[in-house]
Image: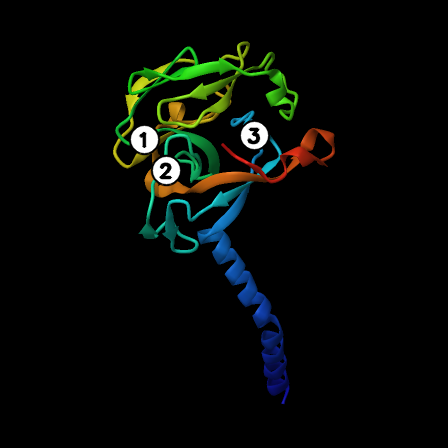
Amino acid sequence: MKEFKCWKKCKGLWQETKPLLVLVVILTAVRSAIADWNDVPTGSMNPTIVQGDRVFVNKLAYDLKVPYTTWHLAQWSNPKRGDIAVFFSPVDGQRLVKRVVGLPGDKVELINDELFINGQRSKYEPLSADIGRDVPADHDGRRLYAEEKADGTPSHPVTILPQRPAMRSFGPTMVPPGKYFMMGDNRDNSYDSRFWGSVDRKRIVGRATMVVMSLDRQHYFEPRWNRFFTKLL
């Protein structure tokens, strides 16, 4: 009798929780294979993405994967130069957000913080310090902002930190087949492909397309309303 009551109770509990469990599975599968968000704790993408931003990740930008895996079911595109990609670090597997600067077969070189792609120097125009108004205060000293335009790539801002020790020259290096060279927009404070090499295509999760929300961690997580739902370039 006791065993029957226990079985009946467990069955009732299962019937009550089953819809919730199914919903959880569906939602996590959607996050795994279709769309997700990524919290940004570091300043490696300043001023494009700042600490406290939460970015929307389009996981269908390039392909469709089996939920909870990196196995490809279908592929219709590849990352383009200038895309802000989300990928698993080849060093420790953590999810990172960086800009694609080199495609398979590209020759990438950095000379005094100026980017060269296939021997062509990127164009630079100075930007007002106002573009970095949401960048949290730090100890890196003076910040310089410039608009970078590489051949065939949409222009975007980059940050230079003249007083910070950094890898300002690199390469040249050839991007291997099936791999992508990633760099942060905060060129003098980014741990990226200059240090750990190009990223395998299968490690790329999707493309960051929008800042969904932003909280200022230095001011009691105050919302930065001006950054909510802003498109990433």
**In the rendered structure, which amino acid carries the disc numbered 2?**
Pro
How would you rate the neighbour count of disc 2 (Cα within 10 Å): few for under 14, some for 14-19, many for 20 or more? some
Q: Earlier in the sequence, mark 3 or mark 2?
A: 3
Q: Earlier in the sequence, mark 1 or mark 2?
A: 2
State the residue in front, 104 or 173: 104
How far across and down, in percent of the image, does residue 14 sit? 58, 75
Residue bearing mark 1: 103
**Front position among marks 3 and 2:** 2
Q: How many marks do you count on the picture?
A: 3
Residue bearing mark 3: 42
**Front position among marks 3 and 1:** 1
Q: In the rendered view, tell whether residue 152 sits above or below residue 26.
A: above
State the residue in front, 17 or 145: 145
Residue at 49%, 32% (x, y): give it. 233
Task: Left or right? Give the position of 37 relative to 9.
Answer: left
Secondary structure beneath disc 3?
A: loop
Is the Cβ of the residue at disc 1 closer than 8 Å to that at disc 2? yes
Task: Left or right? Give the position of 166 relative to 73.
Answer: right
Residue 167 in sight from this viewpoint:
no
**In the rendered structure, which amino acid carries the disc numbered 1?**
Leu
Task: Left or right? Give the position of 162 relative to 6.
Answer: left
The dot on residue 132 is none
Whole-number angstrom distance, CA of label 3 to CA of label 2: 23 Å
Whole-number angstrom distance, CA of label 3 to CA of label 1: 25 Å
Residue bearing mark 2: 79
**In the rendered structure, which amino acid carries the disc numbered 3?**
Thr
Residue at 55%, 31% (x, y): give it. 49
Whole-number angstrom distance, CA of label 1 to CA of label 2: 8 Å
Q: Quadrant of the N terminus?
A: bottom right
Secondary structure beneath disc 1?
A: loop
